[in-house]
Amino acid sequence: MSSERLIWNVKKEGIIKRIKEGQRKDGRDMMERRELKVTPGLIETAEGSSMVELGDTKVIAGIKLNIGTPFPDQPEKGALFTGVELYPVASPSYETGPPREQTIEISRVVDRGIRESNMINLEELCIEPGEKVWTVAIDIFPLDQDGNIIDASAIAAVSALINAKIPKYEDGDIIRGEYQKELPVTDTPIASTFSKLGNEIIMDPALEEEKAQDGRITIYTNDKGNVCASQKGGNSSFKRDEIKNIIKEAVKQSKKPRKELLKNK
Amino acid sequence: MKEKKLMKKGKRLDGRGKEDLRDITIEAGKLKRADGSAYLEWGGNKIIAAVYGPRECFPRHQRSPYKARLDYYYRLAPFSVEDRANPKPSRRGIEISKVSAEALSDVVFLEYFPNTTIDVYTVVLQAQAGTRCAALTAASVALADAGIPMKGLMPSCAAGKIEGEVVLDLSKDEDQCGEADLPIAYLPNKDEITLMQMDGDMTPKEYEEAVDLAVEGCMKVYEIQKKALKEKYRQFNEGGE
């Protein structure tokens, strides 16, 4: 795999030079997201699903609901779980096997945005306090990694949750394929990731830009326009002014994708 | 097993005759990062296959100086079935991957690429019976899309037995309530069977009949595979994708 690394290092200089001149390979502005295409409800076996295309990056997310026992400290709340699998259909550099730290970071960042925005009313998922609650499993499967899997995964997860319905539950049995109501969704958190290359900052890195980046910041914003989760990754540090600007852009640029997701509601 | 009527006046529950396939569509080259790929819908099955290689083989001790190594992975997405599938590889998945890899290894000219590996990844996004055949059918198209030399395209299809009758391509109800299922993969160019499994109960005569019917099904799938590949290049010619 070292030869692949070498190629990206050679390309990096050219990419940074171009960005300094105010140019991105795909002609985007520095603070512009790629075109977003959302296709909810693709998977009939899931209680909710959505395929998200962010430029050429493709991610599919599926929601499964099950009956479980609540956490002892939250006896009247349903439970939520987010898993990402970087299965090698999406990229030649992904490998099979147990999740690595990169996979776990993405799962946890996506999970945090959903959890901290309180987008799902977990109290409504309680069936019998302390005994039986609905558990929501969000499974995310990237299909084509052309940069910024985090944002594509986060948007796919939120879109799939908006699409999800709660199955009928009678005499202790889940009746799959028949639904009682929609999943109680109260917010639409949107993730926006920014890359730092040298001293330049760009939004929504495409693959080449992501490979050349020194650092990244992901900002999750909610319907109110507040920040509900964030994550910095990579070796490069950020100035306070840069972070201020990133937050401003994240709030501004989340409006359009939010509208897109709610359109399908 | 619950009792259910699977045949009515020679027709099956979904309206098919005994020798009819479910609807199949295949699109070649759907993914950007993979060297070759295919998206397939077969009845309610939705499957993506991606191929990488020939590429350097790691770990080194798995290399062969005589031929390429071919790895095949069959995966059920957790949301592809009614009750969420555990993301850990299942024993069933490992077995399917093994026999599928062996089938493809006989078809790809591995000896052209010593010391390398060819990786075939399939993922079932939605499962409705017959996923191993559907995945292998998609994988064969993805290998061709990657430009890997082969003896030919390898379609795959199952025959089975419901209410005493041998039928083609079992649906989900038929798979659950039927009497037997016999998936095969077939190489039309050589008239050879490259994968065969079976469970259930059949007389030797029914078994023979089922193999013949499954081969017939494979020939129909073969035409759809060829069409998918031609379609990709037709789009190229017309300046499409």
Image: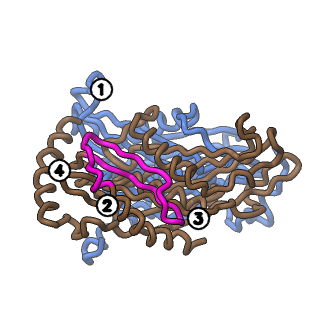
Chain colours: A brown, B blue
Q: Point out residue A188 in the picture as x, y percentages from the top left corner.
A: 55, 63
Q: Nearer the viewer, residue B30 or A205?
A: A205
Q: Are marks 4 and 1 on the same chain?
A: no
Q: CA distance from mark 2 to mark 4?
A: 17 Å
Give, as a single range, the part of the protein colored magenta.
A215-243
In the figure, B121 relative to A118: above or below? above
Q: CA distance from mark 3 to mark 2?
A: 36 Å
Disc with the residue nearer the chain's start (3 vs 4): 3
Q: Which label belongs to residue B59?
A: 1
Q: Point out residue B38 in the picture as x, y percentages from the top left corner.
A: 40, 57
Mark 2 or mark 1, which is nearer to you? 2
- Residue type at mark 4 is Gly
Label 2–label 1 contact, CB within 8 A: no
- Residue type at mark 3 is Gly
Write down the chain letter for disc 3.
Answer: A
Q: Nearer the viewer, residue A17 or B111?
A: A17
